[in-house]
Amino acid sequence: MSTLLMVRHAESTANLASRYTWHDHEPLTELGHRQAREAGRMLAEQYEPSYLYCSRFRRARQTAEEIAAEVGLPVVEIDGIEERCFGELRGKPWDVYRAVLAELDIEELWHHRAPGGESLVDVASRAAPVVKGLAERHVGQQVIVVSHGGVMAALRAWIAGAQATCPTSPVDRRADPGNARIGTWKNRPTPTKNADGFRLDRDGTGWRPPQPLFDSA
């Protein structure tokens, strides 16, 4: 059995401003640093992680560094799990695109690309092999992976094998996995607070459904 502890980065300056990220170097806010440290504390209390990976984007790296301070692991950056590229929407408020997204059904949202950007299909195509590779490399281990909301949405749909179960809109708070806390989704998007994610287990038969990482208590 391999266990991937998927964590979305903590609150960034773009999250705080309710806008699409402008570039790779957006940092965490002060709250984000606290969120990440708390996530690390809970991971250290409830798990015995062996490795800590993160996206190469600054907000994910900073989140991983705060977690590392609690779990005592070095941070390893990997490619392929960086956030979905939003093309011409970069730096613009989320509200700018709400009207467009409101006209799309689930299937269209899954395949939709903003001009110059990626669809969730595109994200899954690059992120899924990376995550599968980590699971195969770390059999019998628990591994922390710090990534992004768009990547998590794409991976959940890929694992479920059903696009309609996927949180598809990064501007819909019901579908947003939040920042830096670890939780779960069922088969459809549900309301979440900041700091959410999930646990992925893989055995010889394949992936198990994503599960909550921490006890509700």
Image (cartoon, grey):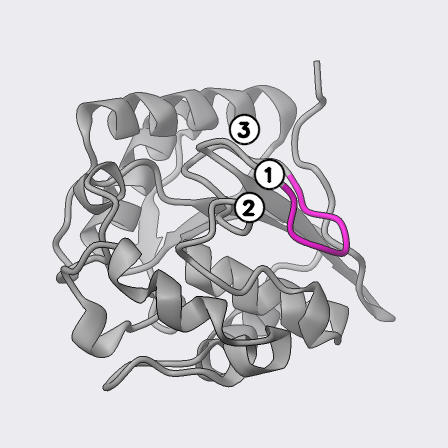
Query: Magenta stretch: dominant SS?
Result: loop
Q: Is there a contact, CB below 8 Å, between mark 3 and mark 1?
A: no
SS class of the residue under badge 1?
Answer: loop
Residue 191: numbered disc: 1
Ranked by sequence position, the earlier of labels 2 and 3 is 3
Q: Is there a contact, CB below 8 Å, between mark 2 and mark 3?
A: no
Query: Does the stretch in magenta take in 36?
Result: no
Ranked by sequence position, the earlier of labels 3 and 1 is 3
Residue neighbourhood size for the residue with mark 2, other residues' Cα within 10 Å, grouped as few (<14), some (14–19), many (≥20): some
Q: Is there a contact, CB below 8 Å, between mark 1 and mark 2?
A: yes
Marks counted in the figure total: 3
Q: Residue at x 30, y 21 (%)?
A: 34
Q: Is residue 30 above or below residue 200?
A: above
Q: CA distance from mark 1 to mark 2?
A: 4 Å
Residue 43: numbered disc: 3
Q: Nearer the viewer, mark 3 or mark 1?
A: 1
Horizontal placement of 17 versus 141: left or right? left
Report x, y in % for residue 26: 14, 50
Q: CA distance from mark 2 to mark 3?
A: 25 Å
Horizontal placement of 10 versus 25: left or right? right
SS class of the residue under badge 2?
Answer: loop
Closer-to-camera residue (111/83): 111
Horizontal placement of 124 versus 107: left or right? left
Q: Amino acid at mark 1?
A: Pro
Residue sitting at the far top: 217
Horizontal placement of 195 versus 61: left or right? right
Q: Which residues are magenta?
A: 184-190
Residue under label 2 = 174
